[in-house]
Amino acid sequence: MTAPVVEGTNTSGADNVAYTTHTINLQGVVSGHLGLIDWANFHSANSPGTLGTGSWTILVDSGGHSTASTFHTRVMYKQLDGTEGASDDFTTANECGFAAGFYRVSGAKDPATQAPYFGTFLEEDTATPNPPSLTPGGGSDDYLYVACGGCRRHIYDGWPTGYGEGNLGIGHTGGLAGTGMGMAGKRTTASTSDDPGTMSMVADNQTWVNTIAVPPSAGLGGNLGLLTETNLAQAFGKAKAKAIGLVSESELAQTLGKAKALAIGILTEADLAQAFGRAKAKIVGLISETDQVFVISTGGLSANLGLQLEADLAQPLSKAKAKALGLNTETDLAQSLAAQKSDVLGLPLEVDSVFVMSAAKAKALGLVSETDVPLAMSTGALIVVTNLV
């Protein structure tokens, strides 16, 4: 996970004018971001009465200051839905002045799941108010801490050490409704607590100060171990990388290739170039990668014909014929056709094959031996002549 980020800020009020409707300036509203408002109100004669915040939820309320009971400070929040527009209105039952600061925060946990953590407002009469130490209830996490407060008739102009996220300070000195506010943020990693240190104002006066901790989202970025929101564009690619066991983002370009390699049992990325060849080799039953160049021929012929060596590859068709004829060795191959003819004619030896046709003719004429063949035609003729006589 990574600490939430202050993406946009704005301020409102601090004009020493008393209202019952108070327009809060927002900034670049984005659906899913968290809105935070630090609000202070004051009137020297009027209590503000009931504060109407519309769809905003009051996170923590200071109540009236012991020195100036009509001076209040509150923190409100809302999960933005993108329909808020450029501003929102709060109301008070009675007229009063106000000052407000707005944060738009990305990467924050949905407040419906966990609202920001907060401390107890500290009431002070000083130019260097000190927000309280805060230990969030969520344990160690990457929090965005916000030191915030309100002041009567003065302006915040200094911030706790290390707080530099979205610092805001406005106010009005003097007047019936002079009000000021200040807020500053700090992003942390694996934090369990924070003690901000002092803020500062132009001069002493009544203040309320507090510390807020915004927990990080456990959404897509958190699940995938992204370090910043700028990594979000890589989220889907990284998800694929994680799914096949990649350790770092640098391996992302190899994700699909490695997936294929793993699928066919390759142990290292160095084997990746051989992945498809090896896959083919395995399909046709080859034992090693060195057989790869013979994949098609060996797979098509050797495997089917039972050849033991690749060197036999030039002989597969003739060997097939030899085996079909029952021959034991390839050296018999040259004699296979003659032997086949001899066997058909009942000759005991292949050497008789040269006499095949003449022997056949001799037997057809009733001759005893092949040596009678030259006499065959003349003998036939004598018999015919004798019969005529």
Image (tube, rainbow, N blue to C red):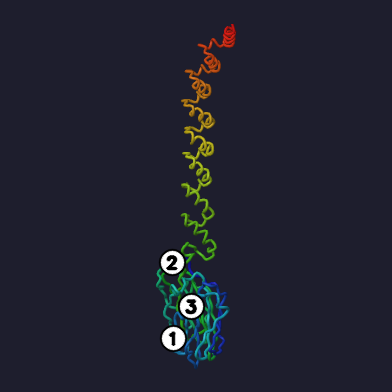
Instruction: Give the image location of residue 134, x and y in percent.
Output: 42, 75
Residue that numbered label 2 is attached to: 190
Q: Position of residue 27 (x, y in %)?
A: 57, 76
Determine whether the residue tagged by mark 3 lies in a helix, strand or loop: strand
Query: Which residue in the protein does label 3 denote?
Result: 77
Task: Judge whether 122 appears above or below 44 on screen.
Answer: above
- The three-letter code of the residue at mark 3 reads Tyr
- Do the residues under discs 2 and 1 have CB atoms within 8 angstroms? no
Residue 63 is marked as 1
Label 2 and label 1: CA atoms lie apart by: 33 Å
183 above or below 229?
below
Residue 172 place in picture, x, y as percent: 55, 86
Q: Quadrant of the C terminus?
A: top right
**Viewer-proximal residue among 43 and 27:** 27
Q: Is residue 226 visible?
A: yes
Helix, strand or loop under label 2: loop
Of labels 3 and 2, earlier in sequence is 3
